[in-house]
Amino acid sequence: MKLKIGITCYPTVGGSGVVASELGKLLAEKGHEIHFITTDRPFRLNRMYPNIYFHQVDVNQYSVFQHPPYEIALANKIAEIITREQLDILHVHYAIPHAVCAILGRQIARSNIKIVTTLHGTDITVLGHDPSLTAAIRFGIEESDAVTAVSQALIAQTMDVIYPQKNIQPIYNFIDERVYRKRPANEQLREELGIAAQDKVVMHVSNFRSVKRVPDVVRVFKRLREHMPAKLLLVGDGPEMTIVCKLVSELNLEECVLFLGKQDNLEELYVLSDLVLLLSEKESFGLVLLEAMACGVPCIGTNIGGIPEVIENGKNGFLSEVGDIESVTKQALQLLTDDNFYQKISEQAIQTVQTHFHSENIVREYEKLYMSLLPQQAGADSE
């Protein structure tokens, strides 16, 4: 059965946008017709793809509105595409605003289309604690026909914070194994970045928000530098960048910390790296962990949220408590000074991704969910 599926997400470099884009691409490869309904072309859709269509949501500024009416414009565009393209499924990422917009769009279109909502974290872990939004989040979840979350931890938190009367199915994030895989490093890129042959390379990727605790990464790196030559690659940008830059300067690390900004070619940077650190205080999954592990790069993450569902401490990486810089330093030194242990962790990291987070299996789970919501005739009509 080939379906017509609408996908709405934020078209940004964040985890939800990445997963939504990659899911759409893989579904399209399997013959489904995918319609992205977003304000901009998702950054992972940087060329033409067969079976993928992009419908831009135009958000205009009017003096009568204090803020641009994104939600109304999105609901209107969703209704338009539901009707014009005769969609079978609408899959939205985030309970608010996207699930609520999808529900409104369905009503505007006078349609019975099935809505699938995927929870990624921020809509629960941050917005869910705002009393002015809780009822809207609950509404978006309960009025969806099916709801998924990217980790068991996020499901538990959703139940604790939002109290929805709705079953939530765990479907983990995934990566494209054709892109994120172990392979030789690009030596020309290594040279261009000024990374010497003897340097150990530590990498961090995030949106540089306070919850990512990037200063902890810098402080761990400072301690590692006392034991070995090393470079730190900081990838991304965000509100904490000024604070991080100041700390790097205060610790006299300017010569060995590289601020690379937002990058599309993360796979090339992972294979240059020896270690990835994700020391967040909140993390519903941690997609960068999967990307790095698939490339054979060991990771150290904090023992919070969905990270322990990806990293098994001491087996395919390390877990540490939030803010425990000394513990992370010891774990990093163990990895970077014991070649045999490092190789064991690297191999197990790759095996974990292939066994538990393989894209083929995850996409099949979504397909099964879509089909379960449709009358048999609806699926047959889309073949």
Image: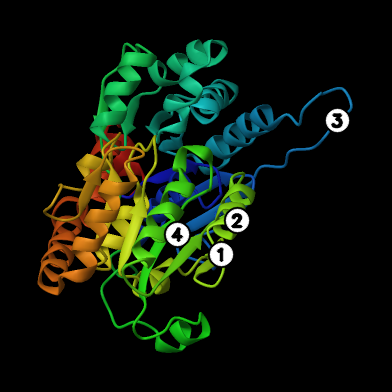
Callout 1 environment at 10 Å: few (<14), some (14 to 19), or many (20+)? Answer: some
> Closer to the N terminus: mark 3 or mark 4?
4
**Residue in the foreground of this view, choosing between 360 and 164:** 164
Disc 2 and disc 1 in contact, CB within 8 angstroms? yes
The residue tagged 3 is 62
Q: Residues within 10 Å of mark 3 (few under 14, many from 20)?
A: few
Distance of label 2 from label 1 (alpha carbons): 9 Å
Residue matched to label 4: 51
| Percent position of residue 245, x then y | 60, 56
Q: Amino acid at mark 1?
A: Phe
Mark 3 and mark 1 lie on one chain; the one further toward the N terminus is 3
Which mark sits nearer the N-terminus, 2 or 1? 2
Mark toward the viewer: 2 or 3: 2
Q: Label 2: state its secondary structure.
A: helix
Task: Give the amino acid at mark 4.
Answer: Asn
- Secondary element at tag 4: loop
Q: In the displayed structure, does residue 189 sit left or right of residue 325? A: right
Quadrant of the rendered image containing residue 352: bottom left
The residue where tag 2 is placed is 245
Label 1 near label 3: C-beta < 8 Å? no
* Residue 227 image point, x, y percent: 31, 68
Q: Amino acid at mark 2?
A: Cys
- Residue 361, relative to residue 46: is it above or below? above
